[in-house]
Image (cartoon, helix red, strand yellow):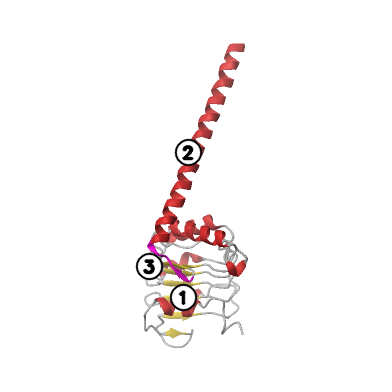
C-alpha cells in the first residue's frame, strides 16, 4: 500500500533528523498546530483559510500527495508563517519553475516525486528564497538522477556536487548527509567549471569584437 510504504517518507525523514516532541495534528483537531498535514486530500489549491490561522505557531506544513501545481500555487501568503521550518510538497505536480516567497525560517524542503527537470533553475530558486536551508530532498524527479529513476552513478554524483556547490549550508541532500569531503570537492568542481565558462565567454567576446573591428576597418578602406 503506497500510503504505508512510500519510496520516501517525508514525515519519517523529518522525525529522524529533527529531535522534537511537537504535535502532529490534522485540520480541525487541536486549536494550536506545530505540525499541520493536508496529505492525501486530493487538493488542487492550497487551503490558506486553515493554514493562515496558525501563523504564530506552525512549524511544519505537509501538503504531500495532492494535485498541486505551479498554476494554482500562490506562495506569497506563505511568508506569513514566520515560524515555519519545514515545507513538505512530495508527490505533487510542481515543476522547475515553481516560485516561493522569501522564507529565511525554513531549513527543510521536501519536494520528492514532482516534475522538476531543470536543476539549475530550481536550485537557484531554492538558494534565493531559502537562505538557511539545511535539508533538501528532491528524489524521484528527472533533475535528480539516481538508481531509482534510471540515472547512472556518474549522473548521481554530478547532481549531488552541483546542488551542494550552490547551497553551501546544506547538511543533508535527499536521504544522505553531506560530508566535508564531498562539500570541498563540489566547490572545487563547480568553481573550476564557472571559471572555465567565464574564460571561454571572455575569449568569444574578444573574438567577436576583433572580427567587428576588422569588418569596420575594411569598410573604411574601401570607401
The residue that label 1 is drawn on is 61
Crowding at mark 1 (Cα within 10 Å: few <14, some 14-19, many 20+):
many
What whole-number distance in Å separates the C-alpha atoms at marks 1 and 3? 13 Å
Seen in the image, is 216 located left or right of residue 165?
Answer: right
Q: State the SS at label 3.
A: loop
Q: Residue at x 52, y 75 (%)?
A: 63
Residue toward you, 73 or 153 = 153
Question: Does the magenta-highlighted stretch encompass residue 178?
Answer: yes
* Tag in front: 2 or 3: 2
First along the sequence among labels 2 and 1 = 1
Residue 105 — which label? Answer: 3
Residue 143 percent coordinates (x, y): 57, 61
First along the sequence among labels 2 and 3 = 3
Residue toward you, 217 or 13 = 13
Residue 133 — which label? Answer: none
Evaluate whether residue 223 shows in this view.
no
Location of the N terminus (image quadrant): bottom right
Crowding at mark 2 (Cα within 10 Å: few <14, some 14-19, many 20+):
few
First along the sequence among labels 1 and 3 = 1
Q: Residue at x 60, y 16 (%)?
A: 219
* Tag in front: 2 or 1: 2
The residue that label 2 is drawn on is 199
Q: State the SS at label 2.
A: helix
Please give the range of residues in magenta.
Answer: 175-180
What whole-number distance in Å separates the C-alpha atoms at marks 2 and 1? 44 Å
Amino acid at each position: 500500500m503506497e500510503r504505508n510504504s512510500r519510496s520516501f517518507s517525508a514525515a519519517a525523514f523529518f522525525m529522524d533528523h529533527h529531535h522534537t516532541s511537537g504535535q502532529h495534528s490534522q485540520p480541525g483537531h487541536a486549536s494550536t498546530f506545530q505540525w499541520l498535514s493536508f496529505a492525501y486530500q486530493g487538493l488542487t489549491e492550497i487551503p490558506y483559510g486553515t493554514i493562515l490561522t496558525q501563523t504564530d505557531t506552525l512549524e511544519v506544513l505537509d501538503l504531500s500527495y495532492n494535485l498541486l501545481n505551479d498554476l494554482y500555487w500562490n506562495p506569497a501568503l506563505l511568508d506569513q508563517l514566520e515560524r515555519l521550518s519545514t515545507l513538505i510538497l512530495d508527490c505533487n505536480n510542481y515543476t522547475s519553475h515553481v516560485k516561493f516567497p522569501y522564507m529565511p525560517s525554513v531549513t527543510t524542503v521536501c519536494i520528492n516525486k514532482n516534475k522538476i527537470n531543470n536543476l539549475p533553475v530550481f536550485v537557484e530558486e531554492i538558494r534565493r528564497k531559502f537562505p538557511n536551508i539545511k535539508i533538501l530532498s528532491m528524489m524521484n524527479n528527472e533533475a535528480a538522477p539516481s538508481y531509482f529513476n534510471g540515472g547512472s552513478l556518474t549522473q548521481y554524483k554530478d547532481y549531488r556536487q552541483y546542488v551542494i556547490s550552490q547551497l553551501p549550508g546544506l547538511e543533508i541532500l535527499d536521504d544522505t548527509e553531506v560530508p566535508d569531503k564531498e562539500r570541498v570537492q563540489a566547490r572545487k568542481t563547480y568553481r573550476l567549471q564557472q571559471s572555465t565558462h567565464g574564460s571561454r565567454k571572455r575569449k568569444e567576446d574578444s573574438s567577436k569584437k576583433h572580427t567587428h573591428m576588422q569588418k569596420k576597418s575594411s569598410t573604411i578602406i574601401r570607401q
